[in-house]
Amino acid sequence: MFFVVAETGSVTAAAGRLYLTQPAVSAALKRLRVAVGAPLFAREGRGLVLTARGEHLLRAGRPHLEALLGVALAPAAFDLRSCDRTLRIGASDMSEEWLLPPLLRALRAEAPLLRLVILPVQFRTVGDALTSRRVDVAVSVADDMPADIRRSDLFHGGFRCLFDPRHTRLGRAPTLARYLAQEHIIVSYNGDLAGVVEDTLQVQRKVRLAIATFHAVGAAVDGTSLVATVPEHVARATLARRPALRDAKPPFNLEGVPMEMLWRAALEDDPAVAFLRDQIVRIARTTSDGRASSRVSPPRPRTP
């Protein structure tokens, strides 16, 4: 502020350049005069001129100001190959299946010193994980977020029914009556027996088992008569590990919500986090488990 007033010779002009009020600039100059212990400006005509003490402060301080401006305006040097950092990713159920293998290959090739910590999140916890800085980037279905959270859709999919054909005669295109005649397993973050089918269709299934994550769905269905209605990417990952299982289209139109990437606005220009975000987008759009989507602001999700 002192340098701007010295350059313009006017408190009013300096206030305009700094987008401040004139009283704010005058008050700051007064505090500086008290701190220095001597007047820095004298009135001359309609403007201000520097006193001898002010001239001395200007000469002594300008090199430091120029150095600070140079540092502030120059882009920070960043070498991805020598970046020795730990980044934390919040990942929802089964996201690790399609994300981590290609992401680790990218890190080995481009950022060999970069380390990752994966923490579990879901739509009820992802906002707190980001705002509390426990994670730098999150990959999850998400509800409403604070204004300082950035978000981008990764892919969007529907639902599939998983079943074991050795124990369940569901078929490839089950009717609603056949579907409701089965016993079901659901993933419930609330610890209840209701999911997206109950919420959306107002139809109550015969729920035999409710579990906390999608990871155990395949094990629970394999060798039993239970049916699981899960997001498409979960069904694909489960079938890849348990080829004896089969999947079918649900006998109703059930729209899924987008899998999103989320991060704090404060990390928008962090080059290491930007590299991580770019890799997540690339993987989501090239893997067979995801496809790009233009939807934004998803509705409040519930678990199937």
Image (cartoon, helix red, strand yellow):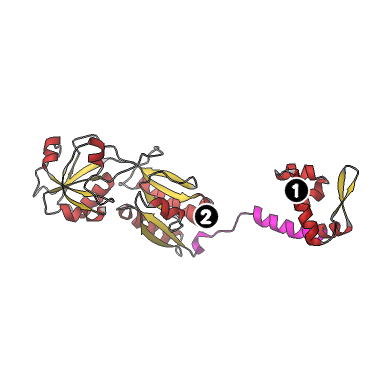
Q: Locate residue 169, reporting x and y percent.
A: 9, 43
| Magenta stretch, residue numbers | 59-83
Q: Main secondary structure of the magenta part?
A: helix
Do labels 1 and 2 touch, CB within 8 Å?
no
Residue at image location 88% in from the left, 55% down from the top: 51
Q: Compare residues 60 and 275 and report the one nearer the observer.
A: 60
The residue at the far right in this view is 45
Element marked by disc 1: helix
Q: Locate residue 290, reporting x and y percent.
A: 33, 45
Quadrant assignment, res 276: bottom left
> Residue 25's mark?
1
Q: Compare residues 190 and 292 and report the one nearer the observer.
A: 190
Distance CA(mark 1)–CA(mark 2): 36 Å
Residue at image location 22% in from the left, 42% down from the top: 160
Q: Type of residue at label 2?
A: Pro
Q: Which residue is mark 2?
A: 271
Which quadrant, please, contains the C terminus?
A: top left
Q: Residues within 10 Å of mark 1 (few under 14, many from 20)?
A: many
Report the side of 201 relative to 3 (left or right).
left
Q: Compare residues 140 and 184 and report the one nearer the observer.
A: 184
Residue at image location 28% in from the left, 50% down from the top: 190
Please determine whether, in this image, residue 106 is positioned above or below residue 150: below
Q: Type of residue at label 1?
A: Val
Dot in front, 1 or 2: 1
Report the side of 279 relative to 78 (left or right).
left
Please determine whether, in this image, residue 278 is positioned above or below residue 59: above
Residue 1 shows up from this direction: no
As for residue 207 lying within the magenta part, the answer is no
